[in-house]
Amino acid sequence: MHYPKVVLVTGACRFLGGYLTARLAQNPLINHVIAVDAIAPSKDLLRRMGRAEFVRADIRNPFIAKVIRNGDVDTVVHAAAASYAPRSGGRATLKELNVMGAIQLFAACQKAPSVRRVILKSTSEVYGASAHDPVMFTEDSSARRPPRDGFARDSIDIEGYARGLGRRRTDITVTILRLANMIGPAMDTALSRYLAGPVVPTAAGHDARLQLLHEQDALGALERATMAGKPGTFNIGAAGIIMMSQAIRRAGRIPLPLPRPVLAAADSLWRATRYTELDVMTRQVVNGVA
């Protein structure tokens, strides 16, 4: 097995990017780890990164190509795609951060002769949310109701650009990990926020299916993909599912069944004010699948 020598991780100031950087920095098989983000890490996160080098850079800027070239990077882990908009922007800003950032990053990878491996953190949201969907999707499945907007649509586009990179540079191994709904004590996710209140709104007459992924398992999958470099698209999630009603009970919360039009109206209000992960979760609950 050919192990990476110099790894660059984007989104290093978020949970997955930061903790993955820390894990890789502790691996003696890796010579150097470069952590990249547009914002500076906290002192605690910087300490966790250990021997990794932090570079403050916006991947939408061509400067990222210089970072890859000068660092002689052979492996790039793209974990920077955001599922919610920054406070200063809305949906258009989010799309620019996600899609334009990926385009610029993959273009830099294409031009860098040293790059041999690209790992993309994607999401199971690319399968959409339809009540007619199968219980479980395979990697070859396609959405019956393809997402038309939001983070899911961005993720579909980003996956397409990653595959395009692999076609143009056949010497680059492209690995795409579609992560299920993540949950864990250290992560602030759509699902954890959805279950945070004492009362949880649900769609009356519907019980959404949930496939979950523990945060540590997500990190383990990213680390393994980084080290192994196996090409292809892989669904990462628990072997089975639980129902939303079960999740609410296990969280010690009280369900509040609401008519689907009421939940749909709340979804529209959230999207009109500021795009967040919660509107994605609401749409999944309304359609009976999460």
Image (cartoon, helix red, strand yellow):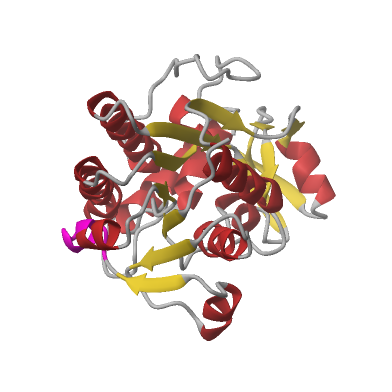
Image vertical order of residue 85 relative to residue 206, above or below: below
User: Percent position (x, y) of residue 271?
Assistant: 35, 50
Image quarter of the C terminus = top right
* Residue under the image location 56 percent in, 52 percent down: 190
Report the span colored magenta: 58-65
* Residue under the image location 47 percent in, 51 percent down: 277
Per the image, is 59 magenta? yes
* Residue placed most toward the observer, 226 or 252: 226
Per the image, is 40 magenta? no
Q: Quadrant of residue 187?
A: bottom right
Residue 260 in sight: no
* Residue under the image location 27 percent in, 52 percent down: 91
Residue 233 in sight: yes
Apparent side of residue 72 relative to residue 227 in the rendered image (left or right):
left
Image vertical order of residue 128 relative to residue 248, above or below: above
* Residue placed most toward the observer, 204 or 282: 282
Apparent side of residue 123 relative to residue 275 in the rendered image (left or right):
right
Q: Give the residue at the far left of this rendering.
A: 62
Q: Quadrant of residue 285?
A: top right
Image vertical order of residue 140 relative to residue 149, above or below: above
User: Percent position (x, y) of residue 278?
Assistant: 50, 51
Apparent side of residue 87 relative to residue 219 in the rendered image (left or right):
left
Q: Quadrant of residue 161?
A: top left
